[in-house]
Image (tube, grey):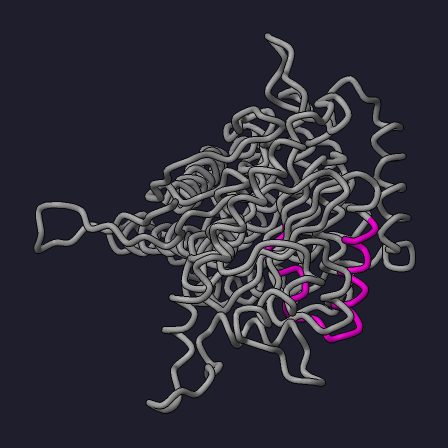
Amino acid sequence: MAGLKSASGQQSKEEMRQVLFNISGACEPGEMLALMGPSGGGKTTLLSILGGRAPKLTKQDGRATFNGSKLNKRVKRQIGFVLQDDLLYSTLTVQETLYFAAMLRLPKHKTKAQKLERVDAVIKALGLGRCRDTIIGDHMRRGVSGGERKRVSVGHELLINPAILLLDEPTSGLDSSAARKMVELLRKLASSGRAVITTIHQPSSNIYRQLDSVLLLSQGHPIFYGKGAEAAAWFDRLGFACPYGVNIADWILDLASGEVSGKQNSGGDVEAPSLVEVRLRPAASASVQLARANSSKVAGVDRSATGLAASAPGASRWGASYWTQFTTLFIRAVRVRRFETLSQQDLAQFLCVAAVCGMIWWQVGHSDTVYGAQNTTGLLFFEALFLAFRTMFQALFTWPNEQKMMLKERASGMYRLSAFYLARSASDIPSDLTIPSVFIAIISTTDINGPPWEAAVLMGFLILSRLLVYIALRMKTKA
């Protein structure tokens, strides 16, 4: 059972809203289990609980076990979790995306050559060889197709060779052909000895036949759990026969949504929700019995064969060393910004602003008067303000995406937070020193023309402006 806590400003006690009810089940190696149901039925919540990624305000009774053991941080890093939204850097190629993930996630005792071999093996297994040097792309830059993007997300998790693969709506946003190929890929991965659990919405008949087991949810209640091929016979015995020629997947989803009318009696039509509540209650109890039977089978599985054996005491939590994390994240951050750093657009912008400022403040600071000092102060204030606000506005557009990626990768245990922060800060140094320094130098030449000590003043202002820019950037990063 899982519940979401919500605090109300008008009530002193917390209100609880239960979203899952009496969910039990098991998934064995080599099995592909699909969580189905209408939107808002609790599929993603259940998958998040299984992967140890439930929101902090979630309260649950019961537990999810892996080979009889509770979920801990080391086991969590051996579970592949593919989100519904493909969080990938749009400016990295397929090869670079998987390479950086391999350097951070694979064990530190593996050499760089071995990690590259693993990347090549994943690219070959997923059929990404033709697009390995193509950027991921986004709405601004053309990159790989939607199906290839999904396969890259799956490959990101396959690098660690997970024993369990959890996927949230892997077919969303894909056409029927790409969705079928994606499910066939998952079927192939399950056949190799992995346990695959996925949420899926409105599968076609071809996709439905690929599924081994189905857990159908309706408003958080399990109304069917068993083999997908037996769903039609089960609901037929309950008085809900699937019409001839109708896709069984569409039929059971309509049934779970309460959009199917029941049989007529003397009082007229009986609405489906009441029938679901009364007649499908035995399905939930049968599901529990089936789950217990499967759990007894899983208890005999060799833990070492699934890769989820108990961890040796004193083993490291992280796949890579701290230095490897820092250097890999630094190189990745530089490559992510390669289309933005030192771009022609930035250079033209700085040169135009510098030219305008040079004409406005042309030689106004050469006179040793109060008026000249005031003009010089105004120039310095404008330079500092322009650089600081420009940096902050850049962070407004870049940091939200960086934060989402950081939270996703941190949930997988890829690196320490301090390594990410230091690497990201260090990657800003080349771009934040080169063009802005030229900008300050151009403007200052129009105002400084005197003794050598004025050059020292220029250097001091240059250092001060750089510190101001970094303070503005770091304040936005912490926010």
Q: Position of residue 326 (x, y in %)?
A: 63, 28
Tell me if residue 216 comes above or below residue 243 in the rendering: above
Does the magenta segment cover residue 103? no
Q: Residue at x 35, y 44 (%)?
A: 58
Q: Position of residue 112 (x, y in %)?
A: 84, 27
Q: Nearer the viewer, residue 152 or 77?
A: 77
- The answer to whether residue 110 shows anywhere in this view is yes
Q: Position of residue 135 (x, y in %)?
A: 77, 58
Q: Which residues are magenta?
A: 167-188
The image quarter in which residue 194 lies: top right
Quadrant in which the N terminus is drawn:
top left
Does the magenta segment cover residue 177? yes
Q: Position of residue 467 (x, y in %)?
A: 43, 37
Tell me if residue 72 comes above or below residue 17 in the rendering: above
Tell me if residue 142 comes above or below residue 416 in the rendering: below
Q: Nearer the viewer, residue 343 or 78?
A: 78
Q: Nearer the viewer, residue 399 or 472?
A: 399
Q: Nearer the viewer, residue 356 or 284?
A: 284
Q: Residue at x 63, y 47 (%)?
A: 166
7 to the left or right of 67: left
